[in-house]
Amino acid sequence: MIANGVTVLIGLWLAYGAIFSTPPGNLNNIELAIASALIVGCAVVGRITNKRSWQSSTNLALGVILALLAAARAYFEPTSVPSFWVILLAGITVAITALWSILYREELGQESRST
């Protein structure tokens, strides 16, 4: 649960950075790489602690996508790689799925009953 809380904060930071950087979406490549590594690490920890969690798989995939974006921005000219929407939507999605994982706990022993 702590890993998901950290992931929520990272996702909110990514969304904030995408919106309020000048020009929008122009985060530092090192910050973006660190954020993506933290998201991947927290997703792995979340996967270990909660076996039935699809949220950690989603966050793992988004962390890898952000890492690829940081690598592309480091290799190519940063202005030629559009990154605003990727960073913004990845940050929002990471935060939402991590919050979902924190707040939603399915009862494992109950089956749905039909009347």
Image (tube, rainbow, N blue to C red):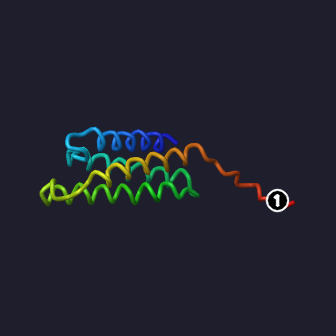
Q: Nearer the viewer, residue 37 or 73?
A: 73
Residue at 41% over, 57% down: 60
User: The C terminus is located in which quarter?
Assistant: bottom right
Task: Determine whether 111 is above or below 36 in the image.
Answer: below
Say above or below: 88 vs 68.
Answer: above
Q: Residue at x 55, y 47 (%)?
A: 100
Q: Is residue 34 left or right of residue 11?
A: left
In the image as oriented, which residue stretches furthest toward the right? Answer: 115
Crowding near the residue tagged with mark 1, few <14, some 14–19, many ≥20 C-alpha atoms within 10 Å: few
The answer to whether residue 104 is left or right of residue 98 is right
- Residue 48, given in percent of the width and then of the height, sits at 50, 54
- In this picture, residue 77 sits left or right of residue 90: left
Q: Is residue 77 above or below residue 16?
A: below
- Where disc 1 sits, the SS reads loop
Q: How many marks?
A: 1
| Position of residue 106 measured from the top left corner of the image (x, y, whole percent) | 66, 51
- Residue drawn at (59%, 43%) of the image: 103
Residue beneath disc 1? 113
Residue type pointed to by label 1: Arg
Q: Nearer the viewer, residue 67 or 23?
A: 23
Asked whether 64 or 28 is in front, the reply is 28
Name the residue: 30% across, 42% down: 19
Q: Position of residue 23 (x, y in %)?
A: 20, 43
Is residue 6 rendered to the left or right of residue 14?
right
